[in-house]
Amino acid sequence: MKRLGIPSWKIVDHDSNATSYNKYNYQWNKVFDVVFPVAFFIPSSVCDVQATVKCGWAARIQLVPNSGGHSYAGLSLGTNHSIVVDFRYMNSIDINDEDESFTVGPGALVGPINAKLWRNGGWGIALGNCMTVAIGGHGIGGGYGIYSTLYGLVIDNLLEIEMVDAQGNAVTVNPNRNSDLWWAMRGVGPGYIGLVTSYKLKMFKAKNLKLTHVRVAYKNKDLPLVVEQYTKWLDWAKRNNESVNAIVSATSDNHSAGFEFTGSGVEVHLVHIQDPDIQPTSSEAVLNAYPKYFTNSTRTEVQTASYIDVLIATSYTPIAPSKTLSVADGTFENIREKKLDFFLSLTKEMATITYSYTKSYFVDKKFRAKDLIDAQKVFAKITPNPIVWFTSEQGAVAAPRSTDCAYVHRDNLYNVRVRFDGPQYDDFLAAKSWIDEFVDVTRFMDKGETYQNFPEKNLKNYLHRYYGKNLNRLIRIKTKWDPYGYFRSEQSIPTLFQT
Ligand SMILES: Cc1cc2nc3c(=O)[nH]c(=O)nc-3n(C[C@H](O)[C@H](O)[C@H](O)COP(=O)(O)OP(=O)(O)OC[C@H]3O[C@@H](n4cnc5c(N)ncnc54)[C@H](O)[C@@H]3O)c2cc1C
């Protein structure tokens, strides 16, 4: 590596620098066996990444990319025989007001991106709500957040990707250059065709938005009723205003998540986004319609807010409570600015070490309350911590066709994600057993697709579940750009020679 002009501090192995090695080998999810990669390579430029690929290929050592390290399946942790390419220092965020875009390194975390865009002109982008996820993995797997039904997924807002291929070439990817990669990289997720070194993304004028949030609360026992009402509501939204997001959180009646979009029991969250440029309609129709669909609730709240207030209220930072802010930190305005400073200070290692377990599937059929009688018997036994989320897959998420790019999941009504996070092993075992049972009893709802940004270890048939009918085309593109299958990791796409 040194012969290729890479300074030794960018290559960290245990023998030469145990302190840095242990810092970089940060494995926040205790569910997985601890691995000890051969080394960590910490690039700061495209040339560094090219040199690593050439060197890794010559030495026949696998390279595993890691941007924010948030893969639910631990796919970026590497193995005892691989080198992890840690993109933490390729995290620049450069805003271009003129063409309403920004260019960002894969190591930039969602928190700093949101904060920087907002503070430099009141811009926004439809990202997920976890502030310690990095754009590196988020931006190629899909990227879903509360704004997605209006602005689309992160992949739908990509304008250009810079990447390094398996031969070590720097490659520009956009609709006019390397169009096969342009198709493949938008949805490839953990499939690993190339190493992304930057993204150019569209942004929107967030300061002009007005948001209306309707929150309707139910008890745990009401899940079947809510699923039926939710399905009917999605129909209403399809006919009247598809950009209205509808999210359901469901858990036990004594759960306290301390997070804006998750309360106790079952809650429906409707989010109307008024954007004077592309969705000027007011929330009046939503406010008139929702009481007819969501009946027999225990409580209803309606709030209007600005983009920045919603960002502050709904952002999720899996950080030790002592490091987050509370009302005691000052007025709301103070808190807003402090929180943005806090987002800018986030690092990968701030993510709490925990046991985390997630399963998910897409739903494309309509179900009635009576279809969920058995599911409710299991749902009633939910231990305090797991949470089930239903997220609408309509509007701008469903606008592209399922073959327009590698992201295949365009024809669905909603996604179901069941997740547990907690510090205790015994709680994890109980939650895992419950999640497996719940997913099993609701199997009839599963369309057979899994979101590749929620990958699962040991998932049977994962290539088909992530890519569906796009898999064969992805295999052909992978074979063209990486004929020897050098870019290989646990759930990467095989070449034609490996299938
Ligand atoms: C707490 C939590 C909350 C989440 N919330 C949401 C949400 O609201 N919406 C949503 O859509 N998703 C969400 N996710 C999922 C998240 O989008 C994915 O885990 C995403 O892939 C993480 O990206 P990363 O760079 O942080 O992770 P990493 O683990 O570093 O990478 C994830 C995958 O992308 C590949 N990859 C990473 N960097 C590169 C690169 N530079 N070049 C090529 N391949 C690369 C890795 O090999 C790996 O397979 C959440 C995950 C967690 C843990």
Image (tube, rainbow, N blue to C red):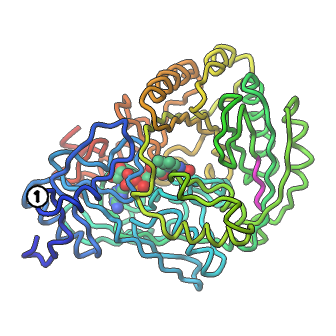
Residue 256 screen position, x and y as percent: 66, 38
> Does any atom of ligand 1 lie closer than 8 Å to the CB of label 1?
no
388 left or right, relative to 82: right
Is residue 70 visible in the rendered structure shown here?
A: yes
Q: Residue at x 62, y 49 (%)?
A: 398
Q: Residue at x 66, y 34 (%)?
A: 255
Q: Main secondary structure of the magenta part?
A: strand
Residue 353 screen position, x and y as percent: 41, 46
Q: Is residue 271 magenta?
A: yes
Amino acid type, callout 1: Asp
Is residue 137 visible in the rendered structure shown here?
A: no
Q: Is disc 1 placed on a helix, strand or loop?
A: loop
> Could you tell me how many numbered marks the image carries?
1
Residue 462, relative to residue 138: is it above or below? above
Image quadrant holding the N terminus, namely: bottom left
Image quadrant holding the C terminus, namely: top left
Provide the residue span drawn in magenta.
270-274
Residue 157 screen position, x and y as percent: 55, 64
Q: Count residues near mark 1 (Cα–Cα under 10 Å), then give few for <14, some for 14-19, many for 20+.
A: few
Name which quarter of the figure residue 385 lies in.
top right
Q: Which residue is mark 1?
A: 15
Q: Residue furthest bottom?
A: 98
Residue in front for this viewpoint, 216 or 242 = 216
Q: Residue at x 54, y 55 (%)?
A: 322
Residue in front for this viewpoint, 450 or 264 = 264
Residue 324 screen position, x and y as percent: 57, 58
Q: Is residue 144 magenta?
A: no
